[in-house]
Image (cartoon, rainbow, N blue to C red):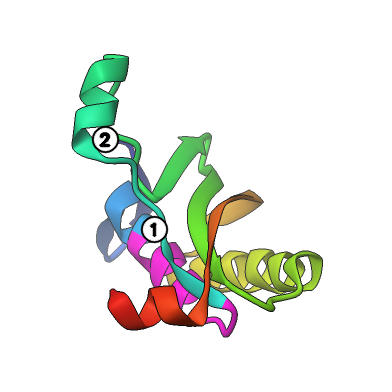
Amino acid sequence: MSEQKYVSNAGSLKISQEVIASIAGYTATDMEGVSALATVPQNLTGWLGKQPLRPVSIQLNDGVAVIDIRLRIRHGAKIPELCRKLQSNVKEAVQNMTGVVVSKVNLQITGVDFAEDAAEK
């Protein structure tokens, strides 16, 4: 697991990818129109022979992050508008809280939750 490291005269600070993913995930699910982060069932990922797909993944290269978020939206959300706001909010939240530069926030909409579906969950 990669991490962002800062060094100053007072000491050092390391920020793990899990922290960045937590900030991005919380920011995403806090937005109106987003139903939930999406996951892939464990049995499917095992069948594919890959690591489990996480709803939020971070790639750090030379201190610059690329964030990938898989999510479900609520029925009626205006997808292009929601995605622009979501990308901006996630980028701003991660940069403000961690100091890590975010170059991209990639979104993958995996489904739409209707009112009766949300009540069952």
99 over 12 or under it: above or below: below
Residue 1, label in figure: 2
Mark 1 burial class by Cα count in 10 Å: few <14, some 14-19, many 20+: many
Whole-percent x, y for residue 25 in the image: 41, 65
User: Residue 98 versus residue 39: which sits nearer the camera?
Assistant: 39
Note whether residue 8 is visible: no
Determine if the magenta segment contains residue 116: no
Q: What residue is rendered at 45% in x and 64% in y?
A: 24
Residue nearer the viewer, 110 or 82 = 110
Residue 36 can be seen in this image: yes
Vertical relation: 12 (above or below) 41: below
- Asked if 49 appears above or below 30 in the picture, the reply is above
Under tag 2, what secondary structure? loop
Amino acid at pointer 2: Met
Direction from residue 60 to residue 20 in the image, left or right: left
Q: Nearer the viewer, residue 9 or 14?
A: 14
Mark 1: amino acid: Ile
Image point (20%, 36%), residue name: 42
Total of numbered circles in the picture? 2
Range drawn in magenta: 22-33
On screen, residue 60 versus residue 18, left or right, reads right
Residue 17, how many percent across, how many down? 34, 48
Q: Earlier in the sequence, mark 2 or mark 1?
A: 2
Identify which residue is drawn at 48% across, 75% down. Answer: 27
**Other residues around mark 2 within 10 Å, as few (<14) / some (14–19) / many (≥20):** few
Q: Which mark is residue 20?
A: 1
Left or right, 16 with respect to 92, comes to left
